[in-house]
Image (cartoon, rainbow, N blue to C red):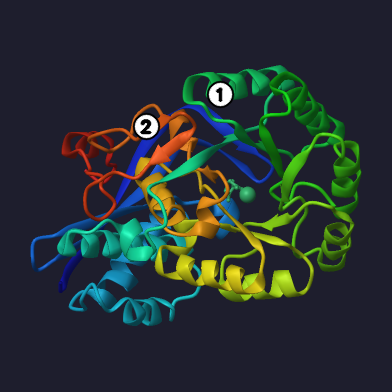
Amino acid sequence: MKITAVEAIPFAIPYVKPLRFASGEVHSAEHVLVRVHTADGVTGAAEAPPRPFTYGETQASIVAVIEQLFAPQIVGLTLMQREVVAARLGRTVGNPTAKAAIDMAMWDAFGRTVERRITDLLGGFTDRMRVSHMLGFDEPATMVAEAERMRDRYGITTFKVKVGRQPVSLDVAVVRALRECLGEDVELYVDGNRGWTAAESAQAMHQMSDCGLLFAEELCPADDVLGRRWLVSRLDIPFIADESVVTSADITREILSGSATAVSIKTARTGFTRSQRVHHLAEGLGVEVLIGNQIDGQLGTACSVAFGAAYRLTARRAGELSNFLDMSDDLLTEPLQIVDGELQIRPGPGLGVEIDPDKLTHYRQDR
Ligand code: MUC
Ligand code: MG
């Protein structure tokens, strides 16, 4: 199980339709494929999605930090030495998706070596998750049409609505239209990506109080410390911390200070090893968790569902597992399939998915 090499391969796959939200927009999946090779001839893979507006990483910075700092520190260790890897990489601050992808590629290689699925190695609670679809900024009618298409084609009945625009009435109109057109049977929640002030958030939540929202996520910045605490104390639904909780310590601070009451777990930023800690911490604190999406491709989505299906707490709610549907293509030999609103874990060892070499050759940007 000795690690012999770590590769960081930049690739770019265009989106059919860009995703727009309050902190940025994504037109192309310019991600980094991370592969960990072992002396036994096993290869594990994961993807790192650069999100400069969330974590300050870029595609070039992820490749550079892996090639220059991280790979030399872990080659020669074994797949079992995850804590040693974490301690060594932890000497470099930041770079969450680069660290997470290495961790998940190691788990994938480990699962393949011992011929077990990652979801079973983690917790083995179930083999599937309900899917929540994220609706990016657009006109109300377009967002309603997209939700209807997702429901009719894939059976998805949970939608996260991107909000945070000015005036707040713009997003209130969208949520109202979605509830009116889709009826009471769908689950709706909103994510502001820090676009509103605390006062604007309170105003919007008041105007949407009859829309039956399940959660509100990052409506205003966590750095507006007192404003956010004031907002969260007024809400009668859980307030999810997402980009404000990159580390476990962030979670402790946000939850104990009353600045959030639920946590989004994104394997793209905490890998499997640190996501386990986040899960256990949230369980101990008694707060809800949700499997979030870092606008992942299919490999990243396979990681999210492997983790989400492993625990009762994460499998309870629909996970955000459908952003890959907006991509024009992907790297896997067999595309993930959302059926009847669910995504199932693949039967094979590790993540159960394979990279198509021809697709990688076509989309990689380093040759
Ligand atoms: C989300 O849940 O916020 C958009 C920005 C980001 O960091 O993640 C996505 C989705
Ligand atoms: Mg979010």
Quarter the N terminus occupies: bottom left
Q: Residue at x 86, y 41 (%)?
A: 204
**Which quarter of the figure has residue 120?**
bottom left
Residue 84, percent from left and from top: 33, 82
Crowding at dot 1, Cα within 10 Å, few <14 / some 14-19 / many 20+, comes out as some
Mark positioned earlier in the residue sequence (1 or 2) = 1
Q: For this view, does 187 lie left or right of residue 232?
A: left
Q: For this view, does 228 lie left or right of residue 14?
A: right
Residue ID for mark 2: 337
Q: Nearer the viewer, residue 238 or 46?
A: 238
Quarter the C terminus occupies: top left
Q: Nearer the viewer, residue 254 or 290?
A: 290
**Which quarter of the figure has residue 135?**
top right
**In the rendered structure, which amino acid carries the disc numbered 1?**
Arg
Crowding at dot 2, Cα within 10 Å, few <14 / some 14-19 / many 20+, comes out as some
Residue ID for mark 1: 151
Q: Residue at x 81, y 67 (%)?
A: 225
Q: For this view, does 190 lie left or right of residue 44?
A: right
Q: Residue at x 60, y 68 (%)?
A: 282
**In the rendered structure, which amino acid carries the disc numbered 2?**
Gln
Residue 320, percent from left and from top: 53, 43
Q: Is residue 231 above or below residue 283?
A: above
Q: Residue at x 50, y 72 (%)?
A: 277
